[in-house]
Image (cartoon, rainbow, N blue to C red):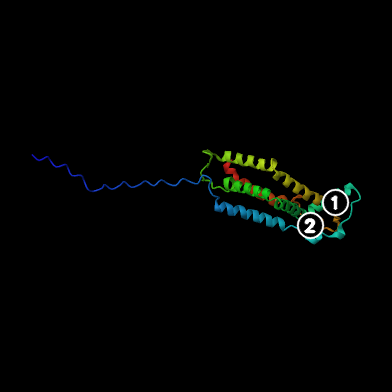
Amino acid sequence: MASAAPPLLPTSVPAAAPATVLPAAPDAIGSADPAATRAFLGRVYDSTKRSLSGARPWPELLDRAALNRPESLSEATSRLRKNLAYFRVNYAALVALSLAVALLAHPFSLAALLALLAAWCFLYLLRPADAAPLNAFGRTFSDRETLGGLIAASAFIVFLTSVGGIIFSALALGAAVVCAHGAFRVPEDLFLDEVPDQGIGGGGATLNLLSFINNATAPRV
């Protein structure tokens, strides 16, 4: 008696279940918010432009005929106080120039400061408010921990490397040049009545910029 034929297997292949597409994880670091970046750069540009608009003519600052040795320390102090009030923007530009020249002469220090500035901008100042927490070294860092790390990195670069010495030396050199010029520049021909009451440093623009930075970082503290 012939054996029964084996059952036939189905020839159709069942359709595969549709693959579930997982949403892409948000960037752990996050890119800078374009709107916040434009606002920040705009405020910096406006503050710088407003500050430089108060600069005195450079020939007036460099007038050799107005240089004379002071007769006493009190006279030198009086000249310095008046010249600081009148040439404050020019003096600030000279100190900034001294700092820029020192950093350009030391590319490593300049690169370290630029990297530190970029870290502050992309990791804290200009990060979107809804950005995911920072993931690094196998763990997640909160905004407060990120801020603490940036402060620690800034302190390390400025105080524990040659960068801090270069910055302080450049600032000291610029301040010495400013003090020497202010003590020897005779201020009698200057229109000191035109000097607005903003303090020696012209701090209005600086306060506006610092207020903007504070407002940008306040929600994260």
Give the camera-side residue of 89 and 120. 120
Q: Position of residue 169 (x, y in %)?
A: 76, 46
Disc 1 and disc 2 in contact, CB within 8 angstroms: no
Q: Nearer the viewer, mark 1 or mark 2?
A: 1
Q: Which mark is residue 59?
A: none
In-front residue for pair 49/127: 127
Q: Is residue 31 visible?
A: yes
The residue positioned 56% from the left and 41% from the top of the image is 143
Q: Amino acid at mark 1?
A: Ala
Residue 168's x, y, as percent?
A: 74, 45
Residue 95: x %, y % from top left: 75, 52
Q: Residues within 10 Å of mark 2 (few under 14, many from 20)?
A: few
Residues 143 and 83: in front is 143
Figure quadrant of residue 221: top right
Q: Say which residue appears at 69% left-offset and 52% top-offset.
A: 205
On the rendered structure, is 87 left or right of 139?
Answer: right
- Tell me the amino acid under the disc marked 2: Glu
Q: Is residue 21 left or right of residue 129?
A: left
Q: CA distance from mark 1 to mark 2?
A: 21 Å
- Element type at mark 1: helix
Q: Secondary structure at mark 2?
A: helix
* Observer-nearest of 195 and 51: 51
Q: Is residue 207 visible?
A: no
Q: As drawn, which residue projects farthest toward the front? A: 1
Residue at the outermost right position: 71
- The N terminus: image quadrant: top left
Residue 34 coordinates in the image, percent (x, y): 55, 53
Of the image marks 1 and 2, the number of the one nearer the N terminus: 1
Q: Which residue is mark 1?
A: 183
Q: Which residue is mark 2?
A: 194
